[in-house]
Image: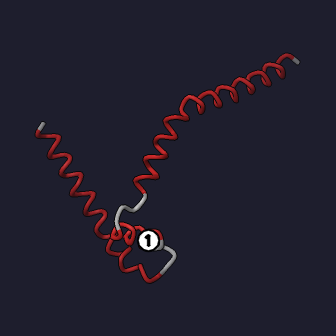
Amino acid sequence: MPSRTFAVAGGICFIAGAIWALYAVLPLLLVVGAVGAASALPSSPGHAALFIVGAFRIAVPQVQPIADINNYLLPLWLIVLGGAMIRFANRT
């Protein structure tokens, strides 16, 4: 029966280690969460309108044309941004 004792002790050590790791990272998680929440808040009426359209683009069919435009522009924007980053990296 010693193997069962070692398994239980190992499980307890694993759980204690996981709790300690979360405790050690908790301040970082709180900061990241606060920054993420603050950046998600709309800062002007225009941003609030875009936020509302984005939040309801799947649930409400009236915003589907805006979602279609977004689906075309987002890949284009990512290609342009990637090209600009490559160009900037080659300059330095």
Residue positioned most to the left: 91
Tell me where residue 21 sits by quadrant. top right
Residue that numbered label 1 is attached to: 52
Work out whether 3 lies above or below 36: above
Residue at image position (71%, 23%) is 13
Residue positioned most to the front: 44
Work out whether 83 lies above or below 19: below
- The answer, for residue 5, to whether it is visible in the render is yes
Work out whether 79 lies above or below 91: below
Residue at image position (23%, 54%) is 81
Residue at image position (51%, 41%) is 30
- The answer, for residue 71, to whether it is visible in the render is no
Between residue 12 and residue 46, name the one nearer to us: 46
Where is residue 34 shown, x and y percent of the image? 47, 46
Q: Amino acid at mark 1?
A: Ile
Residue at image position (41%, 67%) is 51
